[in-house]
Amino acid sequence: MKLSVSNIAWDPAELADHLALLRDLGCDGVELAPSCIWPEPVEAEAEERARIKTLIQRTGLDVTGFHSLLYTRPDLQLFKDHASLREMVAYLNRLVHLCADLDGRLLIFGSPRNRVRHGRSVEECLAWAAEAFTEVAEKAGRCGVSLCIEPLGPSETDFIQSSLEGAALVERVGHPNFRLHLDTKALVGSGEDVEAVLAHYGGTLRHFHVSDPGLAPPGSAGIDHARIGRALCRSGYQGFVSLEMRRGFGPSREVIAKSVAYVRGCYFPGEEAHVAHRASPA
């Protein structure tokens, strides 16, 4: 497995400084909420896309992908009506191109406020979602990236509230570029048997978030990350473990350094010596 950190953990003006910090901490990648880089991500000019891509490449980090996809577009509603669905598909397709331009690997569809059912039945919403995500997955496949569905707990959304429901939607879409993503906060919030879920889905899982309620620093809200980490290691999962933590819990460099060390201890046991060697000056 590899370790990445989302850019919501620091002030957007300090991107270059924090990319260097992730490199020095031995991280493998950075995950991007694109609205933390551009006011409206899909309007970013080619030169600006190239600048950000080069900035990240110079640190040796991979762009693991995008999350918080619809932060700038609360008006886009998957189930409001077909006009809004079509507008959302068009917007997601533009984000696919942006992600590919930065050599990103995937896009995580969480966006709980954009997927409320608006009184529609679950079956009707599944049909609409399959239509939308099939089209975006086809675009993603042509661009060399994947779209992932993120199950979220009932306190956040009323559509796709468990790993089982997420996996069923993935099966319904049936496209190799539409995959399952799991998140610790959501797994615990949904009351799932996390060890059983990871044992079942770990081999086919595309991406994994380490997060706590309120996107607080990991381990601060009662989630047993050591137990989850052991289960993830046993599961056969080989992708990125990405820390999703917002800023605002103290000096960002200190909080990130402590949080990365914590995540490494829970999810990457035995790697501390390797990381210390890799991060040391040449």
Image: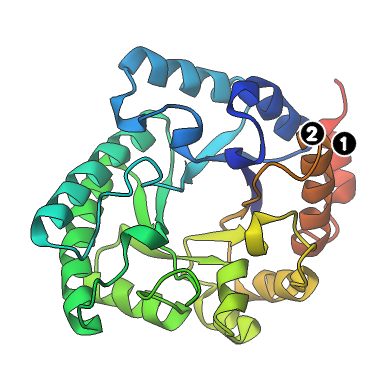
Extreme residue in the left direction: 83
| Residue type at tag 2 | Arg
Let me know if residue 126 appears in the view.
Answer: yes
The earlier-in-sequence mark between 2 and 1 is 2
| Residue type at tag 1 | His
Along the line of sight, which residue is nearer the eye, 143 or 166?
166
Relative side of 219 to 29, left or right:
right
- At horizontal 59% and vertical 76% (from top left) the residue drawn is 189
Label ID, residue 253: 2
Let me know if residue 59 appears in the view.
Answer: no
Is 8 situated above or below 40?
Answer: below
Report, in whole angstroms, how far the alpha carbon at label 2 lies from the one at label 1: 20 Å
Q: Can you give x and y, in whole percent of width and height, for residue 48 in the image?
A: 40, 16
Label ID, residue 8: none
User: Dot 2: within a 10 Å radius of its alpha carbon, few (fewer than 14), some, or many (20 or more) residues?
Assistant: some
Q: Can you give x and y, in whole percent of width and height, for residue 29 in the image?
A: 61, 40
- Residue picked out by circle 1: 277
Relative side of 69 to 23, left or right:
left
**Residue 79 quadrant:** bottom left
Relative side of 129 to 66, left or right:
left
